[in-house]
């Protein structure tokens, strides 16, 4: 069996040190300061702080995120053809670091303009943000496919990466709203501007660290001819790529849909007395810490603070889940582990529809269980993307890492576009109005929007994965055969 022989056939040149794994992971931490805010807080920012109607925000999400999807294959094509002393993909992380930070700040700035002027400003800044995000994130994603060809090291690299993702998510979900309240002092638009300015500046530093600490070890076959037509032909005929494209569409449709509405669920559906009681219980466990930092008492944002505390607990659970991801994938294979973790996550997410308005503890338990199982799944699709790039090289003797990753990231962007637009559409169709007590119909839309509706997308993910053919045996067969081929043309890492 190929996977039983892997230890004897691996080459030590593909090992990756802890310093490089941490440096690589900082890049995704940086991107997620913006990405998690887009998914979790941006709809609320646009409707309740910036001043857009939910329907207008839905169209904005659809147009800008579809534009981002168009940009992905362009930057995949360009990065595959980049020639520099730093490699193909690392230069893009360097070139886009500062623009990423500046545009991230501008996208969460509210100008004192008319409604029409604000809409124009929102479209310009959001489209620019999606453009620079593609220019940065597509090469970053492809970088993971050329750092190492060792399957175990590749899963480990993804695990490090997603620990940093969870820490960035923890910062956004746990700290962003308290920071907005602190810096805004009642003006949430100002609070968002300052908060996102801080996170954007940190992101720039993280990107620079990623560039400085990583190496590109896997090179295309030297005889390979550059051909966009051939790259696209290889892509379409790569069945695992087609399956992963669909998985990313549905997975990020779920995330964008559910997470965009999650804050509304706390703000409008869960009862304030129930959330206050929950915070008081946590405060007692922490010996009054929450009271001392203003999470309780007069003027406290009870819904926002409950949202933050539950998300902190949930992201700790996700970190634990990530720790289980690598050993489970080593035992059962990436595909099978991912498949099972997604199915379990779907069940916990769907059960939220049953929670009564006072069931804050139940929401917390379901959120922790969901994020633990989601944490198990998180590193795996990105490691599987690298396997898909290997599969194309293995079958066709041609490697186009950038276009492979760009194509799957395009699926991610399509999912974000449709999911974000659906979130705004559902709020609009169920009669949501900003900053007022919601009708029973609007509350039902909010409840369905964080449970049943987005879970349909995860169900589709689970079904698609039955047709993904790179199992554990195939992984190690590809690894060993490609390692033998590469010995004849290996170049020094850059």
Image (cartoon, grey):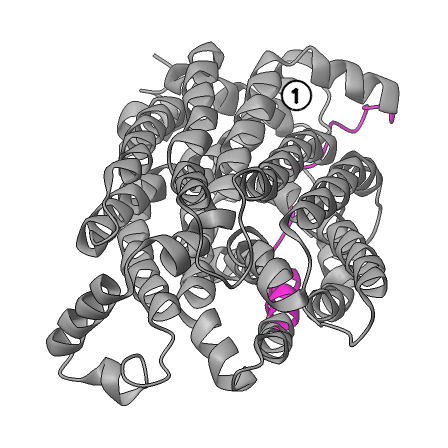
Q: Is residue 144 above or below residue 164?
A: above
Q: Residue at x 59, y 57 (%)?
A: 42
Q: Residue at x 11, y 74 (%)?
A: 285
Choose top left, top right, bottom left or bottom right for residue 273: bottom left
User: In the image, residue 74 lies at what x, y percent?
Assistant: 83, 37
User: In the image, residue 1 lies at what x, y percent?
Assistant: 34, 12
Task: Tell which residue pokes out farthest to the bottom in this image.
Answer: 292
Q: Residue at x 64, y 14 (%)?
A: 238
Marker count (numbered): 1
Would residue 208 be counted in the magenta stretch?
yes
Magenta span of residues: 203-227
Left or right position of 273 against 397 = left
Would residue 116 be counted in the magenta stretch?
no
Q: Residues within 10 Å of mark 1 (few under 14, many from 20)?
A: some
Q: Is residue 275 above or below residue 429?
A: below
Q: Is residue 248 above or below residue 449?
A: above
Of residues 126 and 400, which is closer to you in this image?
126
Left or right position of 473 against 147 = left
User: In the image, residue 315 lies at what x, y percent?
Assistant: 33, 56
Left or right position of 142 against 78 = left
Secondary structure state at the residue bearing disc 1:
helix
Answer whether residue 380 is visible to the viewer in this image: yes
User: In the image, residue 430 lies at what x, y percent?
Assistant: 52, 39
Q: Which residue is mark 1?
A: 393
Of residues 162 and 8, which is closer to you in this image?
162
Answer whether residue 217 is visible to the viewer in this image: no
């Amino acid at each position: 069996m190929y996977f039983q022989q892997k230890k004897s056939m691996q080459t030590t040149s593909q090992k990756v040190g802890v310093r490089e794994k941490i440096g690589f992971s900082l890049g995704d931490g940086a991107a997620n300061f913006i990405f998690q805010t887009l998914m979790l807080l941006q709809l609320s920012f646009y409707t309740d702080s910036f001043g857009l109607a939910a329907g207008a925000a839905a169209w904005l999400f659809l147009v800008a995120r579809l534009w981002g999807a168009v940009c992905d294959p362009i930057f995949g094509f360009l990065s595959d053809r980049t020639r520099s002393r730093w490699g193909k993909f690392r230069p893009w992380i360097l070139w886009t670091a500062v623009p990423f930070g500046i545009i991230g700040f501008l996208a969460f700035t509210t100008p004192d303009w008319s409604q029409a002027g604000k809409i124009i400003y929102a479209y310009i800044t959001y489209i620019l943000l999606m453009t620079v995000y593609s220019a940065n994130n597509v090469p970053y994603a492809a970088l993971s496919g050329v750092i190492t060809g060792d399957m175990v090291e590749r899963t480990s690299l993804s695990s490090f990466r997603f620990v940093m993702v969870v820490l960035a998510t923890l910062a956004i979900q746990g700290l962003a709203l308290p920071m907005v309240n602190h810096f805004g002092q009642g003006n949430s638009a100002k609070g968002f501007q300052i908060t996102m300015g801080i996170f954007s500046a940190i992101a720039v530093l993280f990107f620079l660290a990623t560039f400085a600490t990583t190496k590109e070890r896997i090179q295309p076959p030297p005889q390979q001819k550059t051909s966009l037509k051939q790259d696209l032909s290889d892509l379409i005929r790569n069945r695992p790529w087609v399956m992963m494209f669909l998985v990313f569409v549905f997975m990020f449709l779920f995330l964008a849909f559910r997470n965009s509405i999650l804050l509304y669920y706390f703000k409008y559906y869960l009862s304030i007395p129930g959330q206050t009681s929950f915070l008081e219980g946590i405060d007692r466990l922490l010996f009054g810490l929450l009271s001392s930092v203003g999470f309780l008492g007069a003027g406290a944002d009870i819904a926002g603070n409950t949202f933050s505390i539950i998300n902190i607990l949930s992201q700790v659970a996700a970190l634990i889940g990530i720790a289980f991801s690598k050993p489970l994938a080593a035992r059962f294979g990436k595909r099978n582990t991912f498949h099972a973790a997604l199915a379990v996550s779907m069940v916990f997410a769907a059960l939220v529809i049953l929670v009564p308005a006072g069931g804050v503890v139940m929401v917390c338990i379901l959120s922790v269980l969901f994020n633990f199982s989601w944490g198990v799944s998180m590193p795996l699709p990105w490691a599987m993307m690298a396997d898909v790039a290997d599969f194309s090289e293995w079958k066709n003797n041609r490697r186009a890492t950038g276009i492979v990753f760009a194509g799957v990231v395009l699926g991610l962007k399509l999912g974000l576009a449709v999911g974000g637009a659906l979130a705004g559409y559902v709020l609009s169709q169920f009669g949501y109005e900003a900053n007022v007590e919601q009708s029973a119909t609007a509350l039902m839309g909010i409840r369905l929007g964080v449970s049943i509706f987005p879970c349909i997308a995860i169900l589709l993910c689970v079904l698609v994965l039955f047709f993904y053919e790179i199992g554990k045996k195939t992984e190690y067969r590809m690894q060993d055969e490609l390692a033998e081929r590469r010995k004849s043309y290996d170049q020094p890492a850059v």
